[in-house]
Amino acid sequence: MQMTVHRGGLASAAPGAWLEERAVSETSGISVDPLTPRIGAEISGVDLTRPLSDAQVDGIRRAWLKHQVVFFRDQPMEVEQHVAFGKRFGELHIHPAAPKPVEGHPEILVVHADEKSAYVAGGGWHSDVSCDAEPPMGSILHIHRVPGSGGGDTLFASMYAAYEALSDRMQHLLEDLSAVHSSEHVYKGRYGHSDKKTLRDGDYPSAEHPVVRVHPETGRKAIYVNWGFTTGIVGMKPAESRALLDFLFRHVTREEFQCRFRWRPDSVAFWDNRCTQHLAIWDYYPEVRHGYRVTLKGDRPFGTSTADAGAVRMRRTA
Ligand code: SIN
C-alpha cells in the first residue's frame, strides 16, 4: 500500500511516531535504538544472513527513513547474502569507475585500506556517487576486518538537520539553486583509468542537481551539496560559488548533525544517500580495514520548484 504524505511527512519524531515504530517492531521482531535525536539508530533482532520476511524489510525501511542511517551488529554475511539483503530494498547500482575485483559481482565495491594505501574510500565528506544523473538511493557497507588498535570509525551527518538549522532567508536562497557534481577530480587519480573505455559510461559522470533536495519518500528537504563531488553553483560567479560552497561544506558537518559509528567485525551500516553525508576516518594507517559495499540505485533528485507535495509518496507495505 502507498500512502501520500505532505512535505515534512516523517519530519522529526511526530508524537505518534514512537508508537508506530513500536508497532512495527511487534510484527517484525526488530528493535530500533536511536543513537542521537537527529541521526542514526542501531537495529537488533534480525539475522541478515537469512532471507527476511516482508515485515522485517518494512520495519528496517521505516527505521532507515526515519533515522537516515541504521546499524546492525554481528552479521557474518557471505557476499551472496549481502547482495540478497540489498536487493530487498531496490536494484543494485554499479560504480562508474571503481575496480570490480569480486568475480561474478560487479555490484560489490571493495572498501580496503592497508600499509600500501595512498587513499581510503570515503575519506572526505560526501554522498555516494552524487555525480551520477540518478545518484544512489542508499548504500550498505559490511565491514569484515577492523584495525586491531581501534580507529576506522565512520561519521554520518543529517542533511535534513543541516537544512532545518538555516535561517528562512538562506533556505529560500538555496532552494532556487542548482549545483554541478563532477567526478573526474575524484576518480582519475584514485583508480588511474588510462582508457576511458574502461569506465562504466565511457567517461567520468557529471550532473546538475538542486542544492536543496526534496526526499522522494519522506517529503523532507535536505541539503544536497558535498565536499567530494560538488564543484560549483550554476549561474554564479566563481568567487560567489566558492564562498557559498565553503560555507555549506562547513555548515553541513556541524557536530550536532552527526553520529559516529564504531565498527566491529561483521557490523553493517545502511545509509540513505538522499539525506545524509558520511566520512570514513583514516586514523589507523598502516593497519588493515576491509569490507564490501552494495549500493542501491536511486532516481533523479528534485527540488522544491519541481516537488508536488501531493505527489510525494512514502512507501508502505503495512
Ligand atoms: C564509503 O564511502 O562508502 C566508505 C565508508 C567507510 O569506509 O566507512
Image (cartoon, helix red, strand yellow):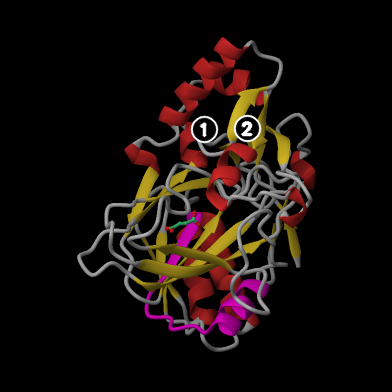
Up-down relation of residue 255 to residue 26 (above or below): above
As drawn, is 200 to the left or to the right of 48? right
Work out whether residue 232 can be spotted: yes
| Mark 2 to mark 1 CA distance (whole Å) | 8 Å
As drawn, is 136 to the left or to the right of 306? left
Up-down relation of residue 65 to residue 224 (above or below): below
Tell me, for residue 212, which label it has, or none: 2
Q: In terms of depth relative to the viewer, which is nearer, 191 or 112? A: 191
Ligand 1 closer than 8 Å to the CB at disc 2? no
- Image marks 2 and 1: residues in contact by CB distance under 8 Å: yes
In x, y percent, where is residue 153?
33, 57
As drawn, is 10 to the left or to the right of 122? right
In the image, farthest residue toward the left: 149
Residue 162 on the magenta span: no
Q: Disc 1 residue type?
A: Tyr
Kindly state the secondary structure of the residue where label 2 is placed: strand
Tell me, for residue 273, which label it has, or none: none
Up-down relation of residue 261 to residue 178 (above or below): below
Q: Disc 2 residue type?
A: Val
Q: Name the residue under label 1.
A: 163
Q: Could you say which quadrant of the image residue 208 lies in?
A: top right
Q: In terms of depth relative to the viewer, which is nearer, 216 or 282? A: 282
In x, y percent, where is residue 119?
42, 50
| Residue at (72% x, 43% y) in the render | 205
Kindly state the secondary structure of the residue where label 1 is placed: helix
